[in-house]
Image (cartoon, grey):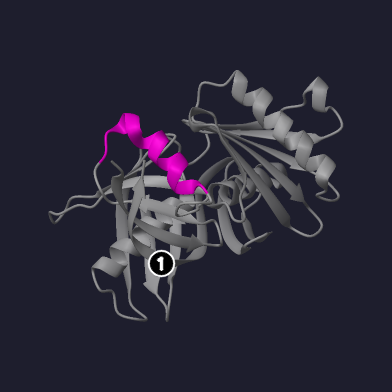
C-alpha cells in the first residue's frame, strides 16, 4: 500500500525545493526525500520536513532530509508562512524558525510581491575560514568555510567546464568520506564575471546535485570575499537559476553578519503517493 505525503513545492532561484507538511518518523525522511526528488515523482533538488507553529509566540521548524542547513528551504518556509497568514501584496512580516544544521534561530523578512515573495534571510556565521590547499587539487586556489554541521570549499576558476565539474565532484566525495558533518559544498566561482556554480553533497542521503541556485553557497561566497578582501561585501551573485544578493559585514578582522536575498514562488501543493 502506498504512503501519502502532503507537500508544497517552491521555486527559490530555480533551486526547486519540496517541503513536507505531513508528519513522518525521522528514520523515514531519507527514503521519502529520495522518492520525492526523483523524476517520476514530484521532482526537486532538495526536501525538508516542516512543523508549523499553532500557538502565538512559538516558532515553526524545518529539518532537511539529511539534517543539513539550507538557506533556500528556510526562505521557502518563510514564504509559506506568509502565504498561510494571507499576507497582502506589498506588505511584509518577520518570520523566525528553528532549522537543522544550526543551533540558532533563523530569521527572515518576507515581503509579498505580485506572484511571489521577496525574502531577506539572516544566515548562520561560519566558525572558521582559511586557505585549504590539497596536493591532489594543487592547481586550484581553494578556501574552506566551516560551519556547525557543514563545510564549503570555494575554488576560483577562469571558466566552468566539464573537466572542472568532474574534479569538483571528486573533491566533494573525498572530503565527504572523512567528514562527520551533514553537508559538503564545492562552490566553483569565476571572479571576473561573479558567476557561481554550486555543487552540494549530502553524504547521509547520498545526494550530489549541481544546484541552479544555492542560498547557503551564496552566503559562503560573500563570507569568503569579505575574508579575502578584509572589507564589507555586497554582491549580486549570478547562478544558473538567476541572481541572488548577498551582504557580509566585516568589522575588526571578523565577520559580524551575513544576509542573503532572493525571491520564492509557490508552484504546487498536494499529496504524493510513494511506495
- Residue at screen point 34% across, 63% down: 269
| Front position in the image: 206 or 165 | 206
Indicate the position of residue 107 as horizontal and vertical percent values: 36, 53
Q: Was residue 34 drawn as part of the magenta stretch in this picture?
A: yes
Give the residue at the far front of this rendering.
Answer: 1
What residue sits 33% from the left and 62% below the top? 80
Instruction: Please give the count of numbered marks on the rendered protein.
Output: 1
- Taking the spot 23% from the left edge, 69% from the top edge, the residue there is 85
Q: Which residue is mark 1?
A: 266
120 left or right, relative to 62: right
Q: SS for tag 1?
A: strand
Q: Which quadrant holds the N terminus? A: top left
At which x and y percent is residue 92? 34, 72
- Can I make out residue 101 in this image? no
Magenta range: 24-38
- What secondary structure prevails in the magenta region? helix
Q: Quadrant of residue 31?
A: top left
Drawn side of residue 43 relative to residue 240, left or right:
left
Q: What is the residue that sits farthest to the top in this orientation?
A: 178
Reply above or below: 79 against 173.
below
Amino acid at each position: 500500500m502506498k504512503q501519502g505525503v502532503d507537500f508544497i513545492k517552491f521555486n527559490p532561484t530555480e533551486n526547486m525545493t519540496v517541503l513536507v507538511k505531513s508528519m513522518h518518523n525521522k528514520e523515514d525522511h531519507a527514503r521519502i526525500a529520495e522518492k520525492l526528488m526523483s523524476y517520476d515523482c514530484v521532482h526537486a533538488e532538495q526536501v525538508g520536513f516542516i512543523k508549523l507553529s499553532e500557538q502565538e509566540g512559538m516558532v515553526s521548524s524545518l529539518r532537511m532530509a539529511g539534517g543539513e542547513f539550507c538557506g533556500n528551504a528556510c526562505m521557502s518556509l518563510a514564504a509559506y508562512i506568509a502565504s498561510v497568514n494571507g499576507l497582502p501584496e506589498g506588505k511584509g512580516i518577520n518570520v523566525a524558525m528553528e532549522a537543522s544544521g544550526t543551533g540558532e534561530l533563523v530569521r527572515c523578512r518576507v515581503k509579498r510581491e505580485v506572484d511571489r515573495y521577496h525574502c531577506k534571510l539572516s544566515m548562520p556565521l561560519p566558525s572558521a575560514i582559511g586557505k585549504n590547499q590539497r596536493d591532489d587539487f594543487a592547481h586550484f586556489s581553494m578556501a574552506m568555510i566551516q560551519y556547525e554541521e557543514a563545510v564549503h570549499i570555494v575554488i576560483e576558476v577562469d571558466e566552468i567546464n566539464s573537466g572542472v565539474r568532474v574534479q569538483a565532484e571528486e573533491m566533494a566525495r573525498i572530503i565527504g568520506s572523512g567528514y562527520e558533518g551533514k553537508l559538503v559544498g564545492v562552490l566553483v566561482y569565476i571572479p571576473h564575471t561573479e558567476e557561481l556554480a554550486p555543487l552540494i553533497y549530502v553524504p547521509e542521503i547520498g545526494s550530489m546535485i549541481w544546484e541552479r541556485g544555492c542560498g547557503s553557497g551564496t552566503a559562503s561566497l560573500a563570507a569568503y570575499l569579505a575574508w579575502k578582501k578584509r572589507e564589507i561585501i555586497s554582491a549580486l551573485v549570478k547562478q544558473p537559476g538567476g541572481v541572488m544578493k548577498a551582504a557580509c559585514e566585516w568589522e575588526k578582522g571578523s565577520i559580524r553578519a551575513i544576509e542573503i536575498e532572493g525571491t520564492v514562488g509557490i508552484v504546487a501543493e498536494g499529496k504524493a503517493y510513494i511506495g
